Amino acid sequence: MDIVRLTDITHPLFSAFWEIYNDNFPKTEKRNLKQQEETFIKKEYALDIYRENDVIKGFLAYWSFPEFIFVEHLAISKEGQGKGLGKTILQNFIKNNTLPIILEIEHPVDETSIRRLNFYERLGFVKNHHLHFQPPFIKGDAPLGLTVLSLEKPFSAMLYASFARKQKEVIMNHQY
């Protein structure tokens, strides 16, 4: 599987990425096209496309900061689901990064969200007990209560405060 970094919406693979992105995330957890275009400008943002034989299998979107990496979106194409690709992508990402890795998931309250938590726990992520609300992607929407996970060990209140501040000021600031 090869990795292609997308840097703008004019890239030939963007439309295939956009379809997978929209198929995998609810409106409250994703950007619109204009917001995505603006996000590419941010130096901290990266969008890696994973493909095999010129077919997109999935993607990983993340933000790199000096003290942590925030995995914002991970998704696998419908055709690629159930084949261990998400596990492979995340394991390789973890192996190639030394900073603490943070991600968010829906609160584990139903079968799907519990399965998602179990998936991340098998890869070494643990739940953090910081009360967390993701700022809304859409102006006027309410913040979204999510569970924060981190790789191997819970992170400190100081690191959480830095993450929450950067999420509001850097990651989501273009939304307002």
Image: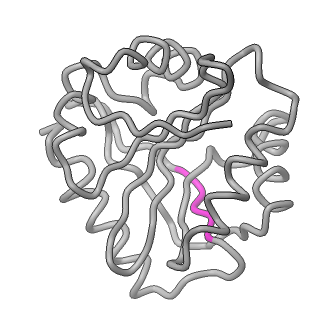
How many discs mark residues in the rendered view?
Answer: 0
Q: Taking 44 as reference, is 129 left or right?
A: right
Residue at 72% over, 67% down: 125
Q: Where is residue 121 in the image (x, y as percent from the top left)?
A: 81, 62
Q: Position of residue 3 (x, y in %)?
A: 54, 40
Outermost residue toward the front? 53
- Asked whether 22 or 142 is in front, the reply is 22
When asked about the image quadrant of residue 27, the answer is: top left
Picture colour scheme:
one colour
When asked about the image quadrant of residue 18, the answer is: top left
Q: Taking 168 as reference, is 30 left or right?
A: right
**158 up-or-down from 29: above or below:** below
**48 up-or-down from 69: above or below:** above
Prevalent SS, magenta region? strand
- Asked whether 56 or 26 is in front, the reply is 56
Q: Does the magenta stretch include residue 101?
A: no
Q: Position of residue 88 (x, y in %)?
A: 77, 48
Residue at 50% over, 23% down: 21
What segment carries the magenta color?
146-150
Q: Position of residue 73 (x, y in %)?
A: 51, 41
Q: Taking 58 as reference, is 64 left or right?
A: left
Residue at 66% over, 25% down: 57
Residue at 80% over, 33% down: 112
Query: Which image quadrant: the N terminus?
Result: top right
Query: Which image quadrant: the C terminus?
Result: top left
**77 up-or-down from 175: above or below:** above
Q: Taking 76 as reference, is 4 left or right?
A: left
